Image (cartoon, rainbow, N blue to C red):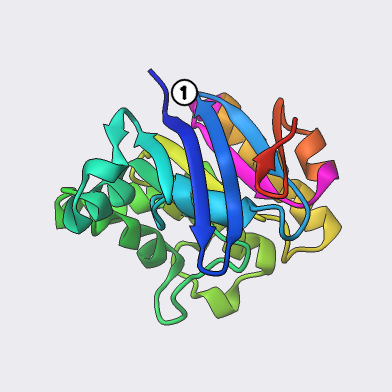
Amino acid sequence: MTVLDLKGVTKAYAGGVVALDDVSLSVHPGELLAIVGRSGSGKSTLLNIMGTLDAPSSGSVRVDGVDAGALRDRRLSALRGTRIGFVFQHFHLLDGLTAVDNVATALLYTRTPRNKRRALAEEALRQVGLGHRAGHRPQQLSGGEKQRVAIARALVHRPALVLADEPTGALDTATGTAVLDLLIDINKRLGTTIAVITHDRDVAARLPRRITLRDGRIVA
């Protein structure tokens, strides 16, 4: 069974702009892959469709065996909240919450009992090497630490797929390398399926599978 299966996905906008053109892609459990392309290649649109944040104009999207196109908004949100983890370039942490509470927010959309959320969030922070920073707020953390918190948040509910959107893009070279090392380690150690969306070919070159987009099509 696939974790993600896109078949014949096209995304067209008013005015005849085609952001994705007949894209088919399967991701299997435990894979670590890069989706790479220049600005305007369709990466962001593909990310949104893979993450069920947007729907294709045509074609099908299955997440962990579930046809996303057959779900109404509430069930689609539940699918996204339980089966997909997101890591963003600019972290998207809540300034008023500690690291552990930021991580625990990902459990609000699951059936995890309130009294178990903190322990799970603390364990997720330990998995990314930040257990000792659990009580710190984002403004007390470095950029690399913020991204580690974001990765812990993406992992805490044990999703079928983690989508990492330019996870090194807001970091200096050394810190970005450390974050990529962490994602590679998580994939090997935990078996987490991870797709990294990036324009950086050096980042893509370190991952075992690479999908290249150009003008809305997979070209390699």
Point out residue 190 in the picture as x, y percentages from the top left corner: 49, 28
**Range of residues picked out in magenta:** 189-201
Q: Residue at x 41, y 82 (%)?
A: 96
* Horizontal side of residue 131 vs 84, given as left or right: right
Neighbours of disc 1 within 10 Å: few (<14), some (14-19), many (20+): some
Q: Is residue 92 above or below residue 197?
A: below
Quadrant where the C terminus sits is top right
Callout 1 amino acid? Pro
Relative depth, front residue between 208 and 179: 208
Quarter of the figure with residue 58: top left
- Asked whether the viewer can see residue 130, the reply is no
Q: Who is closer to the viewer here, 14 or 74?
A: 14
Q: Is residue 171 above or below residue 47?
A: below
Residue 169 appears at what percent x and percent y? 73, 61
Estimate the x, y position of residue 83 in percent, counting from the top left.
33, 41
Quarter holding the N terminus? top left
Taking the spot 67% from the left edge, 61% from the top edge, the residue there is: 144
User: Mark 1 falls on what kind of element?
Assistant: loop
Residue at 58 percent across and 77 percent down: it is 140
* Residue marked by disc 1: 29
Q: Residue at x 76, y 39 (%)?
A: 204
Number of numbered discs? 1
Residue 150 point in image, percent of width and height:
51, 58
